[in-house]
Amino acid sequence: MVSKRRFFSFIFFLFLLNAPVFAQEFQLETEKTMQRLLQQADTDGDKKVTVEDEPKMPFLIPRSQGDSVAIGEIYYLSNLLQELAIARGNDEDYLEISLEEIQEKPADRISRRIKEQFWDDLTRTIDRKGIEKILRDTKASDGVQRLYVPATDTSGIEYYKDLQQELSGFEVVVLPEKITPQYVKSINEKPGLLALKIEEGRGVPFVVPGGRFNEMYGWDSYFEGVGLLIDGRIDLAGAMVDNFIYQINHYGKILNANRSYYLTRTQPPFMSSFVREVYEAMEEKDEKWLRKALEAAIKEYGQVWMVEGERLTGNGLNRYFAEGIGIPPETEKGHFDEVLREFAEKYGLGVSEFVEKYQSGEIDAPEVDEYFLHDRSLRESGHDTSWRLENRTAYLNTVDLNSLLYKYEKDFEYLIDEYFDGRFTTSTGKTYTEDYWEEKAEDRKELMNRYLWNENSGSFYDYNFKTGEQTGYISATNFYPLWSGLASEEQAEKMVPQIMHDLQAQGGILSSARSSVEKTATNEVQRQWDYPYGWAPHQMLLWQGLLDYGYEAQAYELIYRWLWMIIKNAVDYNGTIPEKYDVVDATHKVYAEYGNVGTEFDYITTSGFGWMNASYQLGLELLSEQYVEKLNALVPPGELTFK
């Protein structure tokens, strides 16, 4: 029996045989064609054309010569729908389009749209122009759109206070000079965005993770920056570093995101890598910019990560440690009910009454405080949530964090040696040498090998300094030492087979091994940073780590699997580019907590998802043309040999 797809392809082929040889160009009435296409091809009425639709016949596109061309492939129909949606969004009565554009190769189409459309759609500013979008922010729970401005930013205060006079429903609040957990708790019922840099009367731009976001997120920004640099957007990548410098100087840290309830929380540190990559991408090197950025990164390293008793532990290694009081306010109501029920029963209370009394301070419950210290710290790690970190994050010297700080130390060593003749003096008069940072890095490497490396299993593991034991949890983060360059050649030789055995799936690298989830999970909740899900940052870091250590075949296979999954889902589902994937089933249809940002849209996705876009562009850049041709043909990874 002939499949529907093959039948439509055959009909389309017959039309092409009877068509003239010259290029097929069409001028289509935008609204009329779009409605006709939806009526015929969108059979399930979800305002998309996907493989779940069942059109009964090919869609006919009229040509100027009076005849028609038939389009039967779902992918081509969805491309046409997307282009019609763009034309309608631009108030264009007619769409001029060629058959070649309708049939654009999928790998090329995704890359082009990321470069030409997605980055711009994800760009925000917090200024007169950008505030208009922020005023529609759905996260303002009390209906007032607030902007909190640091007390130390006098020009920013003046700028935003002037805006407050112009805009209704917009309130500017000046933060106190000292931000405490008590203060942050006091404004939880009055949430708002945190100001970023204003320069010459305009907001310095930044990229948000997805279309519904208005915040600049910490570690997302670095990965987005990688994609921006590949696409020649050094202006925007550099602007994001400038906003990080602003955050360090005015908020004391790179924020989890620039929202009021994140004032005591940072995220995984990537500042040194971001600075180095932006600077080295500059055609004309701006040493003044590098000096300012390097000083800010060194400042962040010292005042955020190296404070004893906070994020620096007694053994000399680091942990995530997010201060705060009470229940994290960004979580939806009822999120912690299962956990809190156990505590509430000890006090003879129902969950809602216990929450009310705990939040007000009427109940002093140290064990609940400890749970939420771990939970906030888990969120600070960027891996919210994972069984790897559940109820123990603040007791863990994690492989990922210490690998990233090792990278800071090596980046500082490199930058000072390469661009400052081995000595760098800050604006406060403190001098650092390359040797200082080399020694710091070597000390950290020795400590990581002592506490985190397991010779028997040939892997790094998170170390619980409270119990004095490694967790043994198999996670993609265990392999960050490949990206940071900390692992020895002998260690890498042991680690790489484990990636391919424990973490390789149909669609790329798993966040964690199934065996570790089954061993650790205490209920059936699927944590989004665990098996069977895969995330862009893990792919990007491990690809580069494998390549740096000479494991090209393994890297190319993992890159191909990830890109194949992205392309397959985009081809089958109207161009969808989501936040994450189930890499076991290679699908964007996930059923974990928090859903999947980027899958809900009408007619066309205009933004994809920030670090997913970046991972795609990086993967294409790293793969040779022979593999890209296979991707365009959607050849499954299992049919290829990688070398």
Image (cartoon, rainbow, N blue to C red):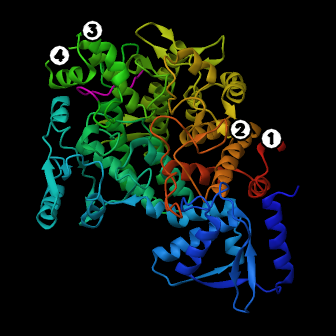
- Magenta-drawn stretch contains 162: no
Tag nearer the camera, 2 or 3:
3
| Amino acid found under the numbered disc labelled 1 | Gly
Mark with earlier residue (1, 2): 2
Would residue 61 be found to the left or right of residue 334 on screen?
right
Tell me the residue that label 1 is attached to: 638
Tell me the residue that label 3 is attached to: 346
Position of residue 365 measured from the top left corner of the image (x, y, whole percent)? 23, 14
Residue at the outermost right position: 1
| Amino acid found under the numbered disc labelled 4 | Ile
| Amino acid found under the numbered disc labelled 2 | Gln
Rendered image: mark on residue 506? 2
Q: Which residues are magenta?
A: 317-327
| Amino acid found under the numbered disc labelled 3 | Lys
- Magenta-drawn stretch contains 321: yes
On the image, which quarter does residue 99 sit in?
bottom right
Rendered image: mark on residue 152? none
Tag nearer the camera, 1 or 4:
4
Position of residue 54 measured from the top left corner of the image (x, y, whole percent)? 69, 60
Q: CA distance from mark 3 to mark 1?
A: 54 Å
Position of residue 256 measured from the top left corner of the image (x, y, whole percent)? 35, 39
Residues at marks 1 and 4 touching, judged by CB atoms closer than 8 Å: no
Rendered image: mark on residue 363? 4
On the image, which quarter does residue 33 sit in?
bottom right
